[in-house]
Image: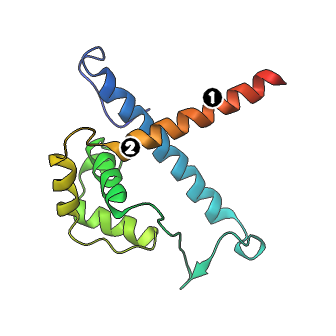
Amino acid sequence: MYPYKTENPNTNRGKNEVFDYLAKAILMLDCAIELIKSEDVSSNPRIQKKNKRFKYQWTADISNLVELAYAILEAGCVDNGDVEIMAFVEFLGETFNIKVERCSDFYYKMRTKSGNRTAFIDKLKKKLELKMDRDDEKNCRR
């Protein structure tokens, strides 16, 4: 189901969890995009239409978008990872209505920072797990 393979699941457990999370996030985004394509834009005020294309505004830091882009490509989630990073970052920038310049600078800062180098991805994972826990609690109360 996921676009990556592991040799030994026991030695890559932490890495596999991140890949699983990213694969699920990409699947969720794909479903959302298909849903948006099928919706009647005129009846949904949350969807803005500019230049005959849907535009969403990235509201997190640019470095977070770059971190996500690198992770998606390294996990092989888009064209099995056979994509130039700059082209992919530009695509995400256009999708989320933000201009990203010098993405290699952001990656260098991520790579050389001490402590948690993938803070954004870890934050995404925690937020999604908290939502799932809340939803599980709601279902248990019913």
The residue lying at 35 percent from left, 37 percent from top is 3
The residue lying at 23 percent from left, 65 percent from top is 86
Amino acid, disc 2:
Ile
> Quick check: 45 above or below 32?
below
Q: Nearer the viewer, residue 131 or 69?
A: 131
- To which quarter of the image does residue 121 belong? top left
Amino acid, disc 1:
Asp
Residue at image mark 2:
121
- To which quarter of the image does residue 9 belong? top left
- To which quarter of the image does residue 69 belong? bottom left
Q: Nearer the viewer, residue 33 or 99?
A: 99
Count the numbered circles shown.
Answer: 2
Secondary element at image label 2? helix
In the image: residue 74, left or right of residue 142: left
Pointer 1: residues within 10 angstroms few (<14), some, or many (20+)? few
> Can residue 127 be seen?
yes
Q: Using the numbered discs, state the Cα–Cα distance from disc 2 to disc 1 in whole angstroms.
A: 18 Å
In x, y percent, where is residue 50? 56, 83
Would you say the residues marked 2 and 1 are in contact, meaning their CB atoms lie under 8 Å apart?
A: no
Residue at image mark 1:
133
> Quick check: 22 above or below 132?
below
In x, y percent, where is residue 122? 39, 39
Q: Nearer the viewer, residue 133 or 12?
A: 133
- The disc placed on residue 79 is none
